[in-house]
Amino acid sequence: MVVTICIGSSCHLKGSRKIVERFNELIRENSVEDKISLNGSFCIGECVRGVCVKVDGELHSVSPETADEFFEKEILGSL
């Protein structure tokens, strides 16, 4: 599974760094390092939706507050 987090200016200001850090923690905690490729990308072009996260090409809007729930449902739930 490929997970791409926008780290462009708008998403950075909305907390993309915190999401990257939390997803890295959750990937380790759930021992799914071999199943998930976590990537960063500059502007995805949906700044109003940010923080933009693509999971296998499907765009989602995530905030630091919803990162754990999103990871559980959309990432672990799709493995």
Image: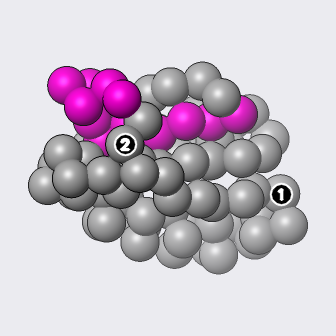
The image quadrant that residue 35 belongs to is: bottom right
In this rendering, the answer to whether 32 lies above or below 60 is: below
Question: Disc 2 or disc 1, which is closer to the eye?
Answer: 2
Q: Is residue 49 left or right of residue 55?
A: left
Left or right, 23 with respect to 1, comes to left
Q: Quadrant of residue 48?
A: top left
Residue 37 x, y percent position in the rendering: 72, 59
- In the depicted structure, whether residue 36 falls above or below residue 22: above
Q: Circle 1 — which element?
A: loop
For residue 20: magenta?
no
Q: Is residue 66 visible?
A: no
Residue under the image location 70 percent in, 34 percent down: 56
The residue tagged with tag 2: helix, strand or loop? loop
The residue depicted at 54 percent of the width and 71 percent of the height is: 24
Numbered-mark total: 2
Residue at image mark 2? 43
Quarter occupied by the C terminus? top right
The quarter holding residue 43 reads top left
C-beta proximity under 8 Å, tags 2 and 1: no
Amino acid type, mark 1: Lys
| Vertical placement of residue 49 versus 77, above or below | above
In the picture as drawn, the residue positioned furthest to the right comes out as 34
Give the percent coordinates (x, y) of residue 9: 21, 53
Q: Position of residue 52 (x, y in %)?
A: 38, 37
Q: Of the residues shown, which amino acid type is indicated by label 2?
A: Cys
The magenta region covers: 45-56
Residue at the image point whose x is 75% and y is 57% from the top: 36
The residue at 14%/55% (across/down) is 13
Q: CA distance from mark 2 to mark 1?
A: 25 Å
Q: Which residue is mark 1?
A: 35
